[in-house]
């Protein structure tokens, strides 16, 4: 009897370790948009390259996520277009990927993919390569892998990063897939990204702020700047949050989010051939030019989208802004994650506590057996 109990001690220790560790769970972002063009969008993904890995440069991150252009990666992070591909990747890095809504949930469309190497496991791919954006269960389900411990070298896997295209409170937003750093609080995350605790809790269906976990994949909706883009323009659904910019109109126009008016601030992209990019003007004013009509009002030649129906044309129109009324409406900047905000220790969810207790009781049951 004593020998049997002694032999079972390692099992008890293993059970206690399993109970003490937070269980891995897959993030599922609600994505209910079904109307044509509304069920697809561009989402932002937070990625922190693991220390000492080959994904620590911008070029390596671009290759990992199969991004079409280096410029697009720079734009998503508000980096100068002169930044070389060999530059170290900021932490966390924002990656813009297409998102598709299907069955009430959203996942990145077709990208990224990953080719299995010798020694890889699904868990190592999920944690070590993609920094916890997905779990091994996510990858297994998306690729019909019946045994997560058995993947073939050379096998191509789709990595379904959660995302969303849904409006929030009736307003279009850019959803940011964010891996929660250790010690974060909902209040700190809300302050950092210019939203509210209530919005984060509601979007993520969290019972309260205390249920936040380190490593949790969180849906953070980012307010986007409004625009005067025509409904007939190719890029009519263009959404740009503060802290990023987007190259549109075949890269001829660079649009950022104004920190004073919550309107798109678009300029011709510097360094491109004038023979390729058509000139956009509002009468005598060029795209992006402004003039003051009074101490409070300014008139601007604003971007109106582009068309490709008969020829490549960049649209522009005059808009008037009242800077006095907009003075108190500056958007909160959205920098890389900072520890400057108040941090609180993450706490377990009640469900995880219940599961952990069940595991412990199950292990104690083994010890009671003769």
Image (spheres, rainbow, N blue to C red):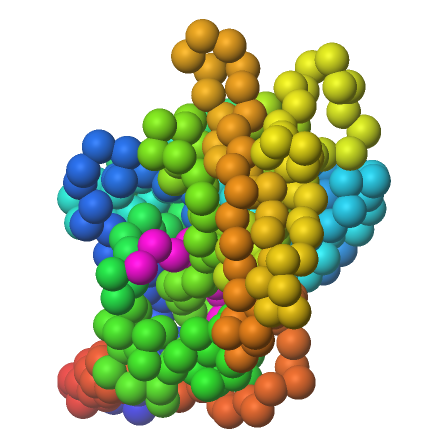
Q: Residue at x 46, y 85 (%)?
A: 187
Q: Nearer the viewer, residue 16 or 203?
A: 203
Q: Residue at x 44, y 53 (%)?
A: 226
Q: Main secondary structure of the magenta part?
A: strand
Q: Residue furthest front?
A: 294
What are the residue bounds of the magenta stretch? 171-180
Q: Residue at x 57, y 91 (%)?
A: 342
Does the segment drawn in magenta span residue 294? no
Asked if one can make out residue 219 in the rendered structure from this viewpoint, the answer is yes
Q: Quadrant of the N terminus?
A: bottom left
Instruction: Give the quadrant of residue 289.
Output: top right
Percent across and percent down for residue 99 are 37, 41
Does the segment drawn in magenta span residue 173? yes
Asked if one can make out residue 28 in the rendered structure from this viewpoint, the answer is no
Percent across and percent down for residue 244 are 61, 53
Instruction: Give the quadrant of residue 141.
Output: top left
Q: Residue at x 26, y 40 (%)?
A: 39
Q: Nearer the viewer, residue 150 or 172?
A: 172
Q: Quadrant of the C terminus?
A: bottom left
Instruction: Give the quadrant of residue 248.
Output: top right
Q: Nearer the viewer, residue 131 or 122?
A: 131
């Amino acid at each position: 009897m004593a020998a049997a109990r002694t032999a079972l001690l390692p099992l008890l220790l293993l059970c206690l370790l399993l109970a003490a560790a937070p269980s891995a769970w897959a993030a599922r972002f609600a994505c209910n948009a079904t109307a044509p063009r509304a069920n697809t969008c561009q989402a932002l993904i937070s990625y922190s390259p693991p220390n000492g890995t080959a994904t620590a440069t911008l070029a390596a991150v671009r290759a990992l996520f199969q991004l079409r252009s280096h410029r697009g990666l720079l734009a998503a992070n508000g980096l100068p277009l002169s930044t070389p591909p060999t530059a170290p990747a900021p932490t966390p890095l924002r990656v813009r990927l297409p998102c598709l809504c299907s069955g009430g949930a959203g996942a990145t469309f077709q990208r990224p993919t990953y080719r299995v190497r010798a020694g890889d496991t699904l868990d190592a791919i999920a944690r070590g390569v993609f920094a916890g954006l997905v779990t091994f269960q996510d990858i297994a389900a998306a690729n019909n892998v019946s045994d997560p411990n058995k993947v073939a070298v050379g096998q191509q896997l789709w990595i379904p990063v959660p995302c969303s295209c849904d409006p929030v409170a009736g307003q279009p937003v850019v959803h940011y897939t964010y891996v929660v750093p250790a010690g974060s609080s909902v209040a700190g995350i809300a302050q950092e990204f210019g939203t509210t605790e209530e919005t984060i809790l509601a979007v993520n269906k969290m019972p309260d702020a205390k249920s936040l976990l380190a490593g949790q994949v969180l849906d953070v909706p980012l307010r986007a700047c409004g625009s005067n883009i025509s409904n007939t323009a190719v890029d009519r659904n263009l959404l740009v949050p503060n802290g990023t910019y987007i190259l549109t109109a075949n890269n001829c126009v660079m649009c950022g989010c104004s920190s004073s008016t919550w309107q798109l601030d678009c300029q011709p992209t510097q360094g491109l051939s004038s023979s390729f990019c058509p000139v956009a003007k509002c009468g005598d004013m060029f795209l992006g030019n402004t003039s003051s009509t009074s101490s409070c009002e300014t008139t601007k030649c604003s971007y109106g989208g582009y068309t490709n129906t008969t020829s490549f044309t960049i649209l522009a129109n005059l808009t008037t802004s009242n800077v006095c009324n907009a003075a108190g409406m500056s958007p909160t900047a959205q920098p890389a994650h900072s520890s400057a905000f108040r941090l609180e220790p993450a706490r377990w969810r009640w469900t995880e506590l219940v599961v952990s207790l069940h595991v412990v009781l199950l292990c104690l049951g083994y010890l009671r057996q003769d």
